[in-house]
Image (cartoon, grey):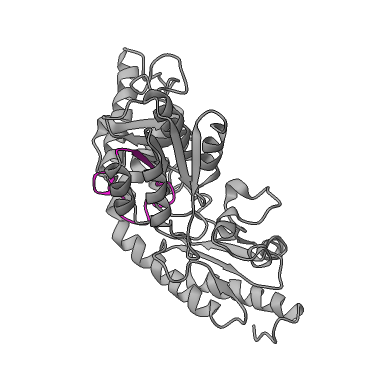
Amino acid sequence: MTIYFDHNATTPLNRQVLEEMLPFLEGNYANPSSIHSQGRFARNAINIAREQVAYLVNAHPSQVIFTSSGTEANNLAIKGALRGMSLGSVACSAIEHPSVRNVVRYFDGILRNAEISVDRGGVIDKDALVGICEQESSSLLVSLMLANNETGAIQDLEVFASIVRSYGHFIHTDAVQALGKMTVDFVKLGVHLMSLSAHKIYGPKGAGALIYDKSISIEPIVHGGGQEKALRSGTENVAAIVGFGKAAEIAGNKLLENKEYLKSLQQYFESRLKQLPGVVLFSADVKRLVNTVFFSVPGIDGETLLMYLDEYDIAVTSGSACGSKSELPSHVLMAMGIKEEIARSSIRVSFGLQNTTAEIDKFFAVLAAQMNVLGLFNAQA
């Protein structure tokens, strides 16, 4: 049976979530824009899900725009706000997800854009942020993730949002990886826009959301029949949206309990990791997501180690799943100033609720055996 340590890439579908979705996959298949009773039933289910998602992040249901993914939510936030507000420039941190970095790059030659540096721990440089805000005379949109999908480093978004607002600029956060693993409060963070995704919280793939401050004017990037307040046209994926709502409800109810369990796994894993020679733990001294461990075993290529572990049915990754096809080392580690040879030996482990310490023990037995074969130390597996 596979040991799955890749929950930052995606999570298994919660059984309760599936049960909530099944009626809309089997019998209740009506279009929610239809005015007959079955259509109204589907529409009501979407409205309930909207309330559930809003409640999880302390927003009003009217601020929730459902999308097909966190990627689409990021695109809608950045492209939509830049066009809707006629903003003159855009900036993001050097460690953003590709669905933010590549959107910002899309505006190369069209708008002024900038990249905000981070320190060795993967934390956004406050002075660099201030500098960009100060030098930009026109209205600026800044995109800063709440928690990094590779290192797990948590950013002080409340402080950063206050800085951005103080200069009269606007801020978006990709909170996809943070959701369900820490408190995510739209109001307290003080951001204008926030992206979310269902499949990171044991919900279905194919459902995301953008939370928006109504003072922001957003231009849709998908035009059509005017669904989602005319901000995201297209017939809604009712089953996925319903699943997102249920997953959000469960995540909120179980947040503290789940955090404690995941933290115990992280601590146990890292106690075992410290017993291995030469291992480098990234973002070790900063606040991190409780389920994430990103580390390097110098002397072993990360992709090679990944495949070796896969032979023993242990699923991990060498970084972001969305960037796993790239032959380049992690852009996050490069931005942190990590040497390329260390970055190329990196492995990310991200725990989920079904994982156990026994699975961690097996992981280290396999890893130690491989290190022993390579002569990195005399392993006692």
Toward which corner of the image does residue 319 lie, by quadrant? bottom right
Magenta region includes residue 182: yes
Q: Which residue is nearer to you in this view: 263 or 184?
A: 184
Vertical arrangement, residue 294 with respect to residue 194, above or below: below
Residue at image position (43%, 37%) is 208
Eyeballing the image, is 339 above or below 65?
below
Whether the magenta-drawn stretch holds residue 270 is answered as no
Q: Residue 147 falls in which quadrant of the image? A: bottom left
Tell me residue 15's x, y (percent): 42, 47
Q: Residue at x 40, y 43 (%)?
A: 135
Does the rendering let one see residue 41?
yes
**Span highlighted in magenta in the image:** 168-189
| Residue closer to the observer: 4 or 84 | 84
- Toward which corner of the image does residue 37 lie, by quadrant? top left
Horizontal side of 320 relative to 34 (left or right) equals right
What is the quadrant of the N terminus in the image?
A: bottom right
In the foreground, 143 or 203: 143
